[in-house]
Image: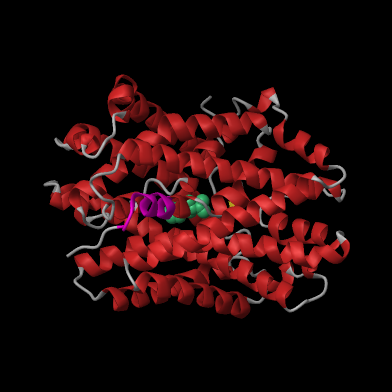
Amino acid sequence: MRENFNSKFGFILAAAGSAIGLGNIYQFPFKAGEGGGAAFLFLYLLFTFVFCLPVMISEIAIGRAARQNAAGSYRVLGHKRWSLLGKTGVLTGFVIFSYYIMIAGWILSYLFDYLTGTPAISQRFPELVANPLRVFGFAALFMAITVLFIARGVRGIESAVRLLMPALTILLLGLVIYALTLDGASQGLAFYLQPSADEFLKTSTIHSALSQAFFSLSLGMGALITYGSYMKSNQSIVKSAALIAIADVTIAFLAGLLIFPVVFSFGMSPSGGPEMLFATLPKAFESMGSIGPFIGFSFFLLLSVAVLTSTISFLEVITAYVSEEWQKKRQSAAIGVGVAVLLLSVLAILSFDPKSTLSSGFLPYPSGISVNYFTFIDDLFSGIYLPLGGLLIILFASYRWKNFKTELATGDDGTLKKISWLLDPMLRYICPIILALLVVISFFDKYFGIHLI
Ligand code: PHE
């Protein structure tokens, strides 16, 4: 007997846990700051609710109807050839997980530093990334914790999220309240929320908001096919998807309310990339006086919790695939996958070590910029593959799979009827066309520096 989530809420919590992670607390605030504040926020909300929600609905429906892993699902639904799409999704998950776990390792290392009262934490980032062994050790520890939950199956996932999601919400709200009461918080809010009109139609802002929406909602690689396969049939797919998206954008928005007031109150300017989390914020915490180490510890605990519910979902996608397709026991599959991901993570870890050839300048793009290995795979798998995978998933559901509508109606509480005038044309025409255009635009922008709009 295949397991199910115990309750409707269990499914929503788990999927929201998958969605809420680095995408929300790390990437979103930073990208919003860079992409003209409210202009980015508007595009991100538009992409999430208009173009991503239909993809999410398709993924969950495919999984729940087939009750199989991301690749096996297409076969069970009678479309064996499409399982290639599922396999590339699982592969994408594998690759993204290999650098996600590296960042999880950085976070755990910082958490450990705060716990042990290490001085001058804000200056430790260059030292940390130049020490691959330390990063690997903490990444491996994070992986071991993830494996412990996944080895226990769907029960393990459900018990984890029931504990972790409320903890995450409380930690985040507490920190936001503290941040908003700091002197100078309003400057940070102005930077975060004031729309700058000229950013609106920049190709780079559009691309950044699109890939952000897909990554943050865990879409395009089959994570929600996998979680959907454990969802009960008496639950509305459309409504659950909407709740997951609302939870995801709310947490992202709150994270910005935390980060910018802190950064600006202490007279710092928001920096790009990992610097923000691992140097700028710790520096602000250090300026806080005696409460600083406590705030720093709480912040890295919040990140660890958010990241853990996401690493659980990465590992679940691949473990479900390995155990069902290759007929392996769940426990050994989870351990085997964990080890394999860690081995691949070495490449990501080395791409931050200045001594390594994988670091900056590793690969020149035709556009002239050079990137390290990490940025290369992030651009390819997260920036291009996820929206492309999402496009193909929606095409499969809308045009190849006969029972899509029936599955959506199963367990629905009336929501579907009310919105089907909108949902039908979205699923069949609007989303596929716009997504295809966006993928092409992003591709040329990213690799060739050609701005099609
Ligand atoms: N959505 C997660 C985040 O925002 C990342 C993720 C992507 C998790 C795909 C699972 C699958 O951090």
Give the residue at the far left of this rendering.
78
Tell me the residue at 33%/30% (across/down): 432
User: In this image, 297 relative to 418: left or right?
Assistant: right
Which quadrant of the view contains residue 119?
Answer: bottom right
Chain part drawn in magenta = 5-15
Tell me the residue at 78%/67% (across/down): 293
User: In this image, 195 relative to 151: left or right?
Assistant: right
Indicate the position of residue 168 as horizontal and vertical percent values: 58, 57
Question: Looking at the picture, does residue 283 appear above or below residue 8?
Answer: below
Tell me the residue at 36%/28% (across/down): 431
Indicate the position of residue 97 as horizontal and vertical percent values: 45, 62
Tell me the residue at 57%/46% (across/down): 251
Residue 391 in view of the camera: no
User: In this image, 448 relative to 134: left or right?
Assistant: left
Indicate the position of residue 159 as horizontal and vertical percent values: 41, 65
| 155 and 28: which is toward the camera | 155
Judge whether residue 7 is colored magenta.
Answer: yes
Residue 266 in view of the camera: yes
Image quadrant occupied by the N terminus = bottom left
| 4 and 326: which is toward the camera | 4
Judge whether residue 184 is colored magenta.
Answer: no
| 224 and 197: which is toward the camera | 224
